[in-house]
Image (cartoon, coloured by chain):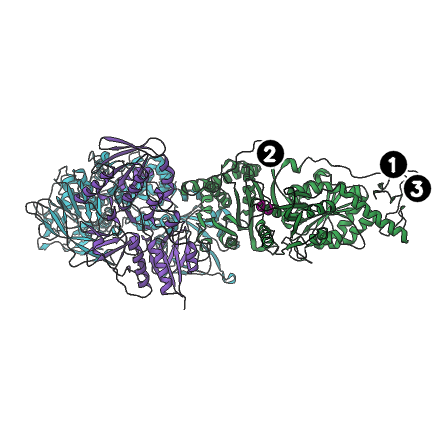
Chain colours: A purple, B cyan, C green
Amino acid sequence: MREDHFIVIGNGPAGSQAAFTLKEKAPEARVTIVTKEREGCCHSHLLPGFLAGSISEKKVFAISLDHYTKSGIKLRTGQSVVDVNPQRKEILLEHKETISYSGLIIAVGGRPYIPEPLLAYREHLCTLKTFQDTGTWRQLLPAADSILIMGGDLTSLAVTKSLLALKKKIYFMLTGEAFWPLRFDKALQEEVSGKLTKRGVTVLAGNKLVGIEPVRSGSCRVYVDGQKIKVDMIGAFFGLVPDIGFLRRSGLQLDRGVLVDEYLCSSHEGICAAGDCAQIYHPEIKDYWVSIGTKNARSLGKIAAVNLAGGRKKTRVDRERIFDIQGVKVNTSWWMEF
Amino acid sequence: MSNKIIYSKQQEDFDYIAVNIPCQHACPVNTNIPAYIRALFESHHSSSYAINAMANIFPGVLGRICSRPCEDMCRHGEKELGNPVNICHIKRAAADLNKTPAEPLKPLPPCGKKVAVIGAGPAGLAAAHDLALAGIDVTVFESFDKPGGMLRYGIPRFRLPRTILEKEINRILKLGIILKTGVHIGDTLSLTSLLENHDCVLVAAGCYTANQLNTDGEDLKGVFSGLDFMIDVCSGRKPAVGKRVLVAGAGFTAFDCARSALRLGAEEVTICLRRTEEDLTVTADEIFQTKLEGVKFNALMLSRRILGTQKVEAVEFVRTRSGVLRPDGKREISEIKGSEFVLPADSLIVATGQTPLELTTGDGKLAVTDTASFTTSMSGVYATGDYLSGPSTVIEAISMGRKAAEVIARRLTGKKYRKKVVRMQETQVTDRLRAWDFVPRQAMPAIQGTTARLKSWAVEVETGFTAQQAAEESKRCYLCYLHYEIDIDRCIYCRYCIDVAPRDCIKLVDRIETNEHGAVTGLHETSVWKDVNAVVIDNARCIRCGECLRVCPVDCISVTRVELMEQGPPSDSSIAEHKNA
Amino acid sequence: MPGVDLTIEICGMSGDGTIAAGTLLNEALSGAGFSIIGFDSYPAEIRGFGRCVTRSRFGTSRMLALSDHTHVLISLDDQQAISRISMLGKNAKVLFDNKPAGTVQEGMSIAAHTAPDADLYGMPFTDLASEAAGTTRGKNLAALGCFTGLAGIDPRFFYTVIEKKFRAKGETVLNANLNSFNAGLTYAHTHFEDAPLVITAPAPEKKKVQRIMLSGNAAIARGALDAGLALYFGYPITPATPIMEYLAKTLPQKGGKVVQMEDEISSIGAVLGSFYAGKRAMTATSGPGLALMAEMISLGVMSETPAVIVDAQRGGPSTGLPTKTEQSDLHAAVFGGPGDSPRIVIAPTDVAECYQFTLKSFELAEKYQTPVIVLTDFFLDNRVENVAAADISGKKRVDGNIYPPKKEQGRYQRYLVTPSGISPRALPGSEGYIYPATGLEHTEAGLPDYSEPVHMQMNAKRHTKIRQALADLPPPKEFSQKGPLDLGVIAWGSSFGAALEAVLKARKKGLAVGALKVISLFPYHEEQIRQFMSRCRRVLIPELNFQGQLANLIGHLHHGDVVRFNRTTGTPLLPSEILLKIQELLQKDNT
């Protein structure tokens, strides 16, 4: 009999947790993690703190690379999966290597979403999702006195906090559609806006962006509804979209994320999804939701692994932590902390 | 080298085309895509246009709004090879760049037969075109004021400028076709009376009955059918949509409605999908442009009730669960019980498809009896286009129109007019460079910035390739109509060709599998040297790079140009030979 | 800014252009001002299944030896390069072709084998070359371009060397290569903008030094050419063959001849004959060949005929390990041969010395009328270094011959006993200078004579003569502080670089250690060596042989303990292992 080979795509909190759980539940099986990141498991929610200098690089990478090796998990860093073939139970890597699996967990997480109308200004917009992203920030921050934050997702607020600690002048363009798949309602928008203003942030709520014009390297002139502000850096925080483009031709059922049931199983046998690329309909809250935040991701990773290894565990929704607007819900454990 | 041309009608050669020239095979009218792309590359814009026009009649129109089944099949789009060639926009470039007016087509001498075509949409006009060329006297009856059908009343001007449409319609009408507009069949003129003056009647009346949601509140103010909405918009009327617009539907019409609503001043337009964005059949370009203009998408929801007292105030939806793919390519969906939710809205545009407005005969409704032979319940009356098949694409409608015309012309004159044939001619390796395989797909230039776009209905969003961009894009075509073959009798099995092959396209085989017609269906590879009986180029994998031919030390690889074409009325075949020059 | 010290490997299948890429890389980095030491490794089998590896260490300070680990691996063929992964250090960068012709099974790509900390850079070398030049042949250049882009090195250094290499092949070939290189460069720039820069080129030297990339073997050949070599006789053997190949191309242009003989015995015979007749000649061989020459060398000793023999050592005994490096011929070179047959044995330690001491050996052979063995090894022969042009060219040849006075009084005494032991030597054909030259023991006149006093006198004469040579031989060179040392490291030949690097590192750590380079192995500078040893509490002699052959030779000069560090794995000694040994010894002393 061929040995079991579990593959986990993604090495974030969900993916790594899934891999370690699989190894625990099925010690005889091969477990491989494939991640396109060059580094180890990065806690991206700590990156704003890392920028402010309050969190060390070591803390950002919670799991040492040796720990994977010692646990018998093959970790492939810097390698992208470009296709999944559920019929042949194979994944294809960007460098054209195929790997067979007996079970697959998709935990690729999300990538920063840039609303299509803003794509024309992409080169001026800094995002903060991976450790590599911190490079640009660290390069530009020392010389940047004023920073424009666009969007309004969870990271944006944490970044704002960090930048305020670094004594930067912050403009904040709060946008309704900042937070896929949510839209702020008026009350929430006002609440956030109030909190920001109290901290000394200039809030440009409800304003429309007309254009961005680079002045010199790094600095930009931003035109907002007739007024013009000059900033040294622009951060874009419009939430994350699941990074599942590689599944387009796989036949898996996709919407924004991978559609899975409450057991995190996809439409195809032997394929689960976890973390914030898993889109779940939850009967209790009567809606599709994605779960974000490190803690949730880890718990989902564990559940996916347990179920892939033959268990039958349901995801739980913690009602208080559900961020509920307009019928679309996000399970988050840390948004409200701001 | 012999330049002998072989015309084959062997099934095995048609089978070959189906596998090896996937774009041409995917095109409902079998446009000779490699030929027109090559002609454009050589700056023969008028030839490129003519090769198109021969098959699809409306190159300028299709170059903008075709659903592009060819690009889905393009070999360049295979997983490891990158993105499909921008076939559609090269077609547009051929039309845009062609400065020489097309040679007027010459119909065959009149044969004394008369046919009435009902509907001046793509199917009707295509049929009229072919019938007129056969020497038949054609009259087209159109209920709208102007010809074009869905091209004119279903597609907004910012996607299809009317000058382009009119130019190509006029080209057809110039064949001597009589067009009578504003005529509703059934009101003043019945099918029966038409049959009295004509040998045959072809119904190409399209689908003009919009599907209803059949829910409460459908009569409220602010509820539009996508079809009526587009007809209004295209006729220059300005429906009041309010600020928040919901569009239910997932086809081109839904997208056109959403984008039109923005141009009518709506601030927040959301397309509500029953399935998901992944399941959309609309082209990726179209989705991107729509998002760029600010339209939002919401998936996995089904409208249940329209709420409001005087006018629409909100719409109640229910969540759907997506299921397996049905054989028709659509995904199964089911409602999730108890998942109702409400979205506020000022208007709702229902663009969930349409059905034919059935014509009546003396005995009742006109029914289609056989879709293959285009016959109906009424003798002498044929049906084609969307009326026959239900909502389809423009290119499918044109294909159906032309096929119906052939059926009618044969029946009336007893003669065949159009025959499919495979033309083969030995040729030389092209000047294509391997480097061209790496040219990125050229993006269609579009007006940047929503303000500029929404300024006027007349602003065409996609501005078209420059000559240079078009030439660059046309470099990308592998020219799959070239067939590379190793002459096994001369091959010395050195395998140099395999060493330089860009992918696993040259194989060591012990036997070749063929179907009952003799077409190659499979190559049985072997890695045991003593079992190798041939070195074979797998033309289904071949990207026509020519590397093998260049390294072959014994010159045993030949290139043959293999094309599926139509032997049509004499006036057309001159074009066919012209572009081969 | 900390200095650069990196090792880069290129690995591919024969036909991938691996060696060419390695050469271009070395030349370009040399142009950029780095110091380079390169060593291509071969598989054990001579034909080797087609794997090619070039390995270069380069840096801002002088590169003395190889490093433990590879920092950058460029794979032109994953199947071959997978075996190189064991050489990778922490966070190594691996550049590989991520667009092979077809899909491959799990494990067939190098990406399946690298450790998680490795930084993978998948780049479509083949496609880039196809795109840029229409042929896959330029994939090595595309790979170099990718590397250059990633490393942030000024591409102009590469343009210069590519131009130099391909200009002669015509515009088309040159452009194809330049285009492939540029395609790789652009790809790296556009796809890895955020990637950390690997290498910062050193500041340009104040005084522009012209440098030449040269292998030890080439340096030996150039030394011989500059010495006015007239004849080369040889029989091919790894690793000495490249000397013959180099000379076969260059010597005839200078009016000389290269003759491939039927074996090593005839080769040394012909060399002796040439020198006897007054023409400079040389042969090069390896251990097995040296063994065959032993009898003829002693003929040179007995008949006091000059000869220059290069012994390029490889793993032994017998056929041994033909493609591996070892320093195990020292005993054979110094003592091999019948009877008491003293000869000069000299061992260069780097490429420049290969040139200098080969050149010098002709003068020594003539002056002291003796065979001179230049002792090198596989690692020294095949390594490349970018040496200053001034160090390896333009040295004046010196005629070492001591001729008898024009008018000889009485009968010519060919083997006249003199205080120095050197008897003026007349070349055959000089009028009035007839003498028998023989392998039999002989009188001053050259007549065979086995009598007691004659043999005693002549043995003494021959040994005196060789001891006299010490004055002309390069003395040991010390690298240390003044005063007493806790440890002295004495090394020779190709291992000295590693020993010196280890000592320099140990000194940086505050340890009182010093290094002594011994070049002349026989005769050796007893006084200087003893003097160095006397300042050392302990002496460590690292060498690539089992017995500790240098330790056997000079160990007795030390008053105390001589620690031998011997390794016979067939690979060069590494600074790290010597450093480890130093630390271990000193730690033991302290506890």
Instruction: Quickly name the residue at label 1.
Output: C405
Estimate the x, y position of residue C480 in percent, counting from the top left: 63, 43
Left or right: A139 in relation to C524? left
Instruction: Quickly name the residue at label 2.
Output: C209
Left or right: B220 in relation to A171? left
Q: How far apart in space, not on screen, are marks 2 and 3 (Cα)? A: 55 Å
> Based on the displayed image, in which of its 4 quarters is residue B379 positioned?
bottom left
Instruction: Quickly name the residue at label 3.
Output: C411
Q: How far apart in space, not on screen, are marks 2 and 1 (Cα)? A: 45 Å
Q: Nearer the viewer, residue B524 or A207?
A: A207
Residue visible at 89% across and 43% down? C413
Q: How far apart in space, not on screen, are marks 3 and 1 (Cα)? A: 13 Å
Q: Quadrant of the C terminus of chain A?
A: top left
* Mark 2 secondary-structure assignment: loop
Magenta-tinted stretch: C502-507
In the rendered structure, which disc, 2 or 3, sits on the residue that comes first in sequence? 2
The subunit letter for the residue under badge 2 reads C
Q: Are marks 2 and 1 on the same chain?
A: yes
